Image (cartoon, coloured by chain):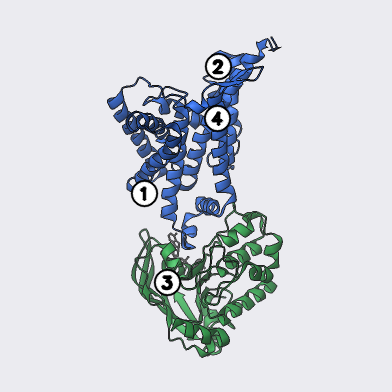
């Protein structure tokens, strides 16, 4: 069944969305860092091939939502289903192997590794059609990119493939952080502010990359401040405030809500 | 007879050789400490005891199981390393979220338990372990006599040190380890079983100590306290080299052995303290250690 769906989604993207198939479902998700209660009952659903954004002011809980999905916060309650599977009891590495790729807000480029070592670090995660460890190619069943494809997309990284991770510029580090999870075969991507501080040309490039990933059938949750970047890409937007979802806005409703969003987001 | 600075050449080379051998042990042990500290952030105070366990396991294996030297060299590190993994799983893991001081205290306690148990069973006097047949004798080099076993220890230690360096700095597994040293949480979020990696890393560090112990058995009296004496010096070596650098641990270990050996020739009174003097100087001039990253 999954293969059939993949075939339809890879050709015409999410527009068809045969996928009432839920890739990610959060129900009444609560999360704590030590004593501080940061998520207060988050509910959201992302279907296969969708690109959904989490919008909100600083401190609204968007990064915490992604971290909670990865089981990287102190304590959680509620329900998380990843591709229909309950992931509440799973350690982070098991969650990754459900086909989840996480690009953290702080990038997390490893300074003792070269650019290429950074790229090759995350193991292949897609359960089905998993390729050999080095994953030098993308097979039929995984949507992972090959190293060559990634270097073609980000020539800067190719040029600097043998430098240490921290010798990269901020922008290059950000490209690397995104590129790193593209070859793993993960098809549910959690991306935290990937455009922060990047030049417009690079943002445009990232936008194209995201469109391409969507076309390949990937499901993307995008935490984004840059509204102009996110608006043309997203199918739906979730507005977060004080650790819960305030509102869901579809792409079609967006133009009418522009002024409102500008006001509540303070952008 | 040829003399250098009024010292017979033979004496000089003899001490240099002894220094290199000691240095090889310092290198192996500080390497294990560095590997463990890198990922677990624990200063493994049980390291000397685990080295001693290696030597004892070789001795007891020979006495009771007829285990020969070569088999011991392979099996003992595996067995003692496995014991290390059990310690990590049952004890260290439970306190990993606490301040690292607790890990230091726990491993210190373990060292006392291992040592005390063996003192109780076998007493403090050392036993000797025979040099294996194939490595007895030596080479006359003209300027000095080189016992085969000492040459072997040097070669074996250097090969193992290089292999570990290669594993960590040049392989994919090593990349996981280096990345885990920086940000274990993120490495796990990428799908790598970090808790397993932590266990194996501790096992590797302990196995290195046990390997050094087997190498040492034919050279030094095998006694329950052989590790604690050595460990103090090894900690000084680690401080000099800087915690956490693999190459730094190896090079500093060898260099300190040589410096110690040369001091024995030129100013024997200071031979036992010279490493600590160097440590004090390094701490004053470069507190992070020669190879350590400045905080
Ligand atoms: N490690 C932490 N320990 C304690 N509290 C935290 C931690 N990380 C985040 N918080 C708190 O959780 C709340 C949500 O933070 P989060 O990082 O999820 O916000 P965000 O929506 O991603 O905002 P930003 O735009 O600043 O990234 C904030 O009030 C923050 O202070
Ligand atoms: Mg954030």
Comes first in the chain, label 1 or label 4? 1
Please indicate, yes or no, whether residue A157 appears anywhere in the rendered image.
yes
Secondary structure of the residue carrying numbered label 2: helix
A171 up-or-down from B231: above or below: below
Mark 4 lies on residue: B152
Quadrant location of residue B128? top left
Alpha-carbon span between mark 3 and mark 2 = 66 Å
- Are there few (<14), some (14-19), or many (20+) residues within 10 Å of tag 1? some
Q: Nearer the viewer, mark 3 or mark 2?
A: 2
B3 up-or-down from A263: above or below: above
Residue projecting furthest to the front? B133
Q: Quadrant of the N terminus of chain A?
A: bottom left
Q: Colour of chain A?
A: green
Chain letter of mark 3 equals A
Chain letter of mark 1 equals B
Mark 2 lies on residue: B270
CB atoms at circles 3 and 2 under 8 Å apart?
A: no
Alpha-carbon span between mark 1 and mark 4 = 37 Å
Q: Colour of chain B?
A: blue
Chain letter of mark 2 equals B
Q: Do the residues indicated by labels 1 and 3 lie within the same chain of the protein?
A: no
- Are there few (<14), some (14-19), or many (20+) residues within 10 Å of tag 2? few
């Amino acid at each position: 069944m999954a293969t059939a769906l993949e075939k339809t989604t890879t050709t015409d993207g999410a527009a068809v969305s045969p996928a009432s198939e839920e890739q990610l479902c959060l129900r009444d998700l609560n999360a704590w860092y030590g004593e501080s209660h940061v998520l207060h009952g988050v509910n959201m659903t992302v279907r296969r091939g969708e690109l959904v954004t989490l919008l909100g002011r600083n401190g609204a809980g968007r990064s915490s939502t992604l971290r909670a999905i990865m089981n990287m916060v102190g304590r959680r309650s509620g329900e998380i289903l990843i591709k229909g599977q309950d992931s509440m009891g799973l350690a982070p590495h098991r969650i990754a192997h459900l086909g989840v790729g996480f690009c953290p807000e702080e990038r997390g480029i490893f300074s003792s590794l070269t650019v290429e070592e950074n790229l090759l670090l995350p193991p292949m995660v897609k359960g089905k059609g998993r390729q050999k460890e080095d994953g030098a190619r993308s097979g039929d069943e995984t949507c992972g990119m090959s190293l060559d494809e990634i270097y073609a997309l980000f020539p800067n990284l190719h040029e600097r493939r043998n430098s240490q991770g921290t010798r990269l510029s901020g922008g290059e580090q950000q490209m690397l952080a995104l590129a790193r999870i593209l070859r793993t075969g993960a098809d549910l991507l959690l991306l935290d502010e990937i455009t922060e501080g990047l030049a417009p040309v690079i943002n445009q490039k990232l936008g194209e990359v995201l469109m391409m990933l969507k076309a390949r059938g990937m499901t993307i949750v995008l935490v984004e401040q840059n509204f102009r970047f996110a608006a043309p890409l997203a199918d739906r937007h979730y507005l977060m405030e004080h650790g819960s979802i305030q509102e869901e806005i579809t792409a079609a409703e967006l133009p009418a809500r522009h002024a409102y969003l500008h006001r509540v987001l303070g952008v | 007879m040829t003399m250098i600075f009024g010292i017979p050449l033979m004496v000089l080379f003899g001490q240099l050789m002894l220094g290199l051998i000691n240095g090889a042990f310092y290198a192996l042990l500080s390497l294990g400490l560095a590997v463990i500290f890198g990922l677990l952030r624990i200063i493994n105070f049980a390291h000397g005891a685990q080295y001693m366990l290696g030597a004892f396991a070789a001795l007891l294996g020979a006495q009771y199981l007829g285990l020969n030297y070569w088999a011991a060299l392979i099996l003992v590190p595996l067995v003692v390393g496995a014991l290390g993994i059990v310690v990590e799983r049952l004890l260290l893991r439970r306190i990993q979220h606490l301040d690292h001081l607790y890990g230091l205290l726990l491993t210190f306690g373990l060292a006392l338990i291992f040592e005390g148990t063996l003192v109780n069973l076998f007493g403090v006097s050392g036993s000797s372990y025979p040099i294996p047949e194939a490595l007895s004798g030596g080479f006359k080099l003209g300027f000095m006599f080189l016992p085969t076993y000492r040459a072997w220890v040097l070669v074996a230690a250097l090969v193992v040190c290089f292999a570990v360096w290669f594993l960590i700095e040049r392989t994919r597994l090593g990349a996981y380890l280096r990345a885990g040293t920086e940000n274990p949480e993120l490495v796990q979020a990428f799908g790598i079983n970090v808790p397993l990696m932590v266990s194996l890393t501790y096992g590797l560090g302990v196995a290195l100590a046990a390997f050094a112990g087997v190498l040492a058995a034919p050279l030094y009296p095998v006694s329950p306290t052989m590790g604690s004496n050595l460990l103090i010096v090894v900690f000084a070596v680690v401080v000099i080299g800087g915690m956490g650098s693999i190459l730094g641990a190896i090079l500093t270990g060898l260099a300190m052995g040589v410096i110690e050996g040369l001091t024995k020739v030129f100013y024997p009174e200071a031979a036992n303290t010279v490493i600590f003097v160097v440590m004090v100087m390094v701490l004053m001039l470069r507190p992070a250690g020669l190879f350590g990253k400045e905080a």
